């Protein structure tokens, strides 16, 4: 009898696996779990989507798993409503995106190049291998590096960028799958499921109820200026490619008030990818490392991550609430430690672009007065009014209506111990209205976007950089050091180098991507 009991017990998993519902005699927990029931409803939806993309029937998941490589080229039109020359005139630029996923060797290469208002280089790339990762900065011809672990979340996010690897990511995390019922998407009934990806992102997938093809993916996020946001990517124009069906058109709304419209121009599956792509290009050099987040530059003058702090007798002034609420809360903590008992009286916002206003909310909660341009004033009020329930910040619980003062031409803040001069130097090729700060005693210029000094090396300038240099001459400002909002403090020599590189680029190809590999930095 004992032998018969053991044989029947060993047979249970096989019998249970063949049943569409959990066997309540064997499993006493799944049937009682709302999460498990939702998972069991979601799995068939995902299975049908994988089958629709691979057209392999019972072998669909094997087709995904056996995909050794995926190479795509895309052209893009990028519309940024918070980044144009002035509000109401969005920045519309063209871009190229190249992605190479070598699944067999566990390597990823991605390069994005786009135009930017003002004429500066805006090309960046990422390389991730099993042993290391690299961030490529073509604007200043440098790259940074770190361990593979430090790039783990980037790897996960990049894999979500292609439909086959997105579906495979969902399949590999079945315990996180959930059914969210049905919704209409683009006028079509859709089955909706979600899963938690390995980087912690909650991803929602909308599958066409008839074709079972993915129509949309969605990630919830807290955006600094827009607030609670569902960043979505829509897929359309599916076409057959080597036994797969892939979307040739994608439209991403977000992050923030951005829209990325991409068209697939080239795709290759299961082909060899050159090893040379997975090492930094020879035109780039290793950067010296990140700047300290809070550094004393002179008595009462500190450079901080994306900005500066100036001490006066009874108060301090902050130049730029850049980034996000979380970044600003960290800056506030540093300021309180460095200047105990001194309130922040003013925050200078150089211009209306979204990244430069993303951190205004915590400063607004402190009751500061904002000094800014006329076109940035309504945008600051919009950012303060945005809803942040997913990640509440200090302004969410301590909202104020701050004073906002407009600087039309210039403004001086002075108390006998310090003097800060503010100038509106627009219009520029980057934005119509732009504030810069000047400390005459220290001969320090504070500026945003017209000159970037990433990781201690200046980016190649643009038309807007030429305009900055001309404005310094016109105003007769004696500048020795420069605090850029983007990058590390530098000198007038960095400005000249940025101008030299800008002029050297005139003989390089104008095509996106090709221009990145031109050796204009050595001319």
Image (cartoon, rainbow, N blue to C red):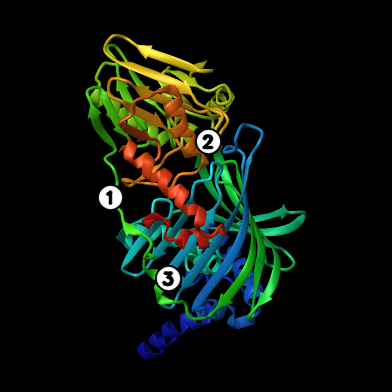
Q: Circle 1 — which element? A: loop
- 514 with respect to 139 (left or right): right
Give the residue displayed 64% in from the left and 39% down from the top: 90
**Which numbered dot is residue 354?**
2
State the image coordinates of residue 60 (x, y, percent, origin top left).
Answer: 59, 79
Q: Quadrant of the C terminus?
A: bottom left
Tell me if mark 3 has few (under 14), some (14-19) or many (20+) residues whose alpha carbon lies within 10 angstroms of its own.
some
Residue 402 in sight here: no
Q: Quadrant of the N terminus?
A: bottom left
On residue 277, the disc is 3
Residue drawn at the location 48% of the way across and 50% of the way down: 121
Query: Residue 487 location in percent, x, y?
Result: 36, 41
- Secondary structure of the residue carrying tag 2 is helix
**CB atoms of marks 2 and 3 within 8 Å:** no
Q: Residue at x 28, y 42 (%)?
A: 291
Q: Which residue is mark 1?
A: 289
The residue closer to the viewer here, 322 or 237, is 322
């Amino acid at each position: 009898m004992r032998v018969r009991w053991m044989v029947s017990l060993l047979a249970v998993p096989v019998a249970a696996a063949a049943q569409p519902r959990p066997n309540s005699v064997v499993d006493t927990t799944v049937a009682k779990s709302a999460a498990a029931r939702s998972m069991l409803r979601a799995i068939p939806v995902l299975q049908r989507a994988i089958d629709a993309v691979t057209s392999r029937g019972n072998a669909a998941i094997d087709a995904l798993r056996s995909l050794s490589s995926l190479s795509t080229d895309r052209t893009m039109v990028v519309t940024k409503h918070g980044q144009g020359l002035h509000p109401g005139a969005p920045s519309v630029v063209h871009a190229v995106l190249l992605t190479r996923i070598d699944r067999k060797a566990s390597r990823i290469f991605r390069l994005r190049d786009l135009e930017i208002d003002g004429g500066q280089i805006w090309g960046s790339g990422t390389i991730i291998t099993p042993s290391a990762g690299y961030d490529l900065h073509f604007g200043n011809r440098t790259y940074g590096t770190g361990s593979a672990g430090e790039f783990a979340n980037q790897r996960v996010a990049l894999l979500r960028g292609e439909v086959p690897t997105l579906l495979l990511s969902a399949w590999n995390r079945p315990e996180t799958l959930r059914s969210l019922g049905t919704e209409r998407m683009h006028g079509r009934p859709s089955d909706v499921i979600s899963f938690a990806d390995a980087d912690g992102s909650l991803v929602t997938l909308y599958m066409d109820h008839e074709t079972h093809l993915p129509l949309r993916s969605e990630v919830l996020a807290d955006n600094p200026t827009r607030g609670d946001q569902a960043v979505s990517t829509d897929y359309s124009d599916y076409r057959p490619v080597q036994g797969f069906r892939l979307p040739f058109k994608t439209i991403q709304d977000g992050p923030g008030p951005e829209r990325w419209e991409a068209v697939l121009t080239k795709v290759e599956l299961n082909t060899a990818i050159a090893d040379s792509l997975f090492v930094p290009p020879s035109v780039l050099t290793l950067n010296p490392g990140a700047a300290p987040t809070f550094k004393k530059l002179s008595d009462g003058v500190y450079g901080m991550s994306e900005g500066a702090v100036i001490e006066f007798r009874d108060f301090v002034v902050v130049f730029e609430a850049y980034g996000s609420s979380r970044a600003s809360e960290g800056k506030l903590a540093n300021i309180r430690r460095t200047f105990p008992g001194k309130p922040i009286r003013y925050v200078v916002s150089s211009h209306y672009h979204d990244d430069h206003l993303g951190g205004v909310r915590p400063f607004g909660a402190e009751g500061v007065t904002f000094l800014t341009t006329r076109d940035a004033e309504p945008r600051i009020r919009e950012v303060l009014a945005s809803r942040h329930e997913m990640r509440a910040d200090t302004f969410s619980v301590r909202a104020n209506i701050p004073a906002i003062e407009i600087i039309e031409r210039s403004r001086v803040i002075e108390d006998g111990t310090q003097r800060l001069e503010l100038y509106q130097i627009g219009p520029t090729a980057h934005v119509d209205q732009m504030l810069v700060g000047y400390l005459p005693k220290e001969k320090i210029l504070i500026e945003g976007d017209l000159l970037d000094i990433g990781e201690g090396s200046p980016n190649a300038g643009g038309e807007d950089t030429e305009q900055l240099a001309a404005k310094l001459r016109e105003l007769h400002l004696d500048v020795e050091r420069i605090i850029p909002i983007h990058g590390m403090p530098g000198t007038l020599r960095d400005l000249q180098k940025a101008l030299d590189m800008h002029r050297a680029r005139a003989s390089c190809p104008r095509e996106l991507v090709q221009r990145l590999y031109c050796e204009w930095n050595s001319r």
